[in-house]
Image (tube, rainbow, N blue to C red):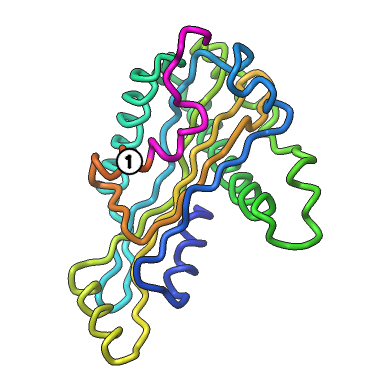
Amino acid sequence: MFALVRLLLIVLAPSVPGMALAAYTVVNPAYAASHASAGQPRKILLLPPQINVAELSAGGVILRQDDWSRQAGENLLRAAEALFRAGGRFETVPMPRLSAEESEKLESLIGLYGRIAQAIHMYGSGRGGGWEHKKTAWDYTLGDGLSFLREASGADAALVFSGADIISTASRRTAFAVGLLIGVNVPLGQSFISAGLIDLKTGDIRWLSYEQSMTLDSRDPAAVRTLVNDLLAPVSQPCDGAC
């Protein structure tokens, strides 16, 4: 998955103690006017998170952990459900039963979302002088490939989490601390996770938030709740009766 590959490159780059980037959020200009109004979706389908969690050993070996990945995905879904329930603005919709063909199609489309999410962050955050127009000329869409989910679930939009979390072992963290003392760079694991809302009628990505951290442990439900509260802040404010 692109996110894990990109994160491996980050892990091999120089790291700075305590480095963390604040969440980056961008809203599709076509939906900005209705972003906090009755024009926004009401029923949100929670798609299976595509999160790769791996362990970084003292020797620099990165090994994917399937159990940790499943746990991280469950933590993300629970946190999103709780946040939306508390806000009262949205109704979450569980995944409908899919055929093998539909499941394969969904997996491919979520993979496509991951690549698009990377482009939104890269160009939307101003990297590359020739891409300034991408901040307003928004054409990020998955097309109509997810319409079958709208029909099967009755949802207006789908929320998807994508990314990776590489967790340093205790021995790796010790090596990092020793490296600081002797002037040797020993990179620690990092995580970056995005959350995006996809309009199931048009396939357009309505908004996206992105977070990068060196301290997140996606196996920890409390840490994931904090992350999700940050990622979904643009659409998770409590309903004041007008929504």
Picture layout, residue 94 above or below residue 209: above
The 10 Å Cα crowd at callout 1, few under 14, some 14 to 19, many 20 or more, is: few
Quadrant position of residue 47: top left
Residue 187, position as x, y percentages in the image? 37, 75
Q: Quadrant of residue 177?
A: bottom left
* Vertical placement of residue 215 versus 183, above or below: above
Instruction: Determine the residue positioned at 63% across, 30% down.
Output: 206
Q: 63 or 21: which is nearer to us? A: 21
Residue lying farthest to the front in this orientation: 240
**131 relative to 213 in the view: left or right:** right
Q: Which residue type carries mark 1?
A: Thr
**Residue at position x 59%, y 51% in the image:** 118
Q: Is residue 102 magenta?
A: no
Residue 9 point in image, percent of width and height: 49, 69
The picture places residue 183, in percent across and down from the top left corner, at: 34, 90
Front position in the image: 71 or 75: 75
Q: Which residues are magenta?
A: 228-243
Q: Report the residue marked by disc 1.
A: 226
Where 111 falls versus 237 (above or below)? below
